[in-house]
Image (spheres, rainbow, N blue to C red):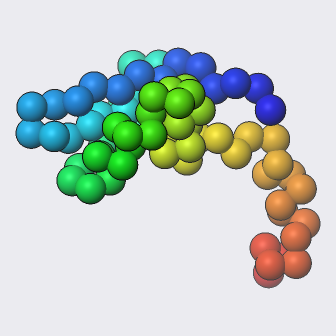
Amino acid sequence: MAEAQGFAYAERADGTVVITHHGRVAGTLRGGRAAQFLAEVDDDPQLVMARWTGNYRRGNERQARGHPRNRP
């Protein structure tokens, strides 16, 4: 899987964390979720931000379309 790029985050004074992707807001975390994110982001920031925003599943959508659970 290719490494995610273009993510950045900013921690606000009220404890809110705003995650951006190429300058656009991709997610806002508050409270306990923000604290969890900040504790985890030191490992691999780009991958962690991609996972927290849901922007990490690329390339498997075509395979998932044929899965029995996703058929009408």
Q: Which residue is depicted at the point 36% across and 49% down?
A: 36
Whether residue 27 sits left or right of residue 16 in the image: it is right
Q: Residue at x 16, y 40 (%)?
A: 15
Q: Is residue 21 visible?
A: no
Answer left or right for 44 relative to 64. left
Towards the viewer: 42 or 34: 42
Return the residue nearer the eye: 44 or 2.
44
Whether residue 47 is visible here, answered yes or no, is yes
Q: Describe residue 9's horizontal placement relative to residue 67 as left or right.
A: left
Place of residue 1 in the rendered image (x, y in percent of width and height, measured from the top left) = 80, 32
* Residue plotted at (53% across, 37% down): 48
Residue 26: x, y in percent? 41, 37
63 relative position to 27: left or right: right
Establish if 44 lies above or below 15.
above
Q: Position of residue 49 (x, y in %)?
A: 49, 35
Taking the spot 88% from the left edge, 78% from the top edge, the residue there is 68
Nearer to me, 70 or 27: 27
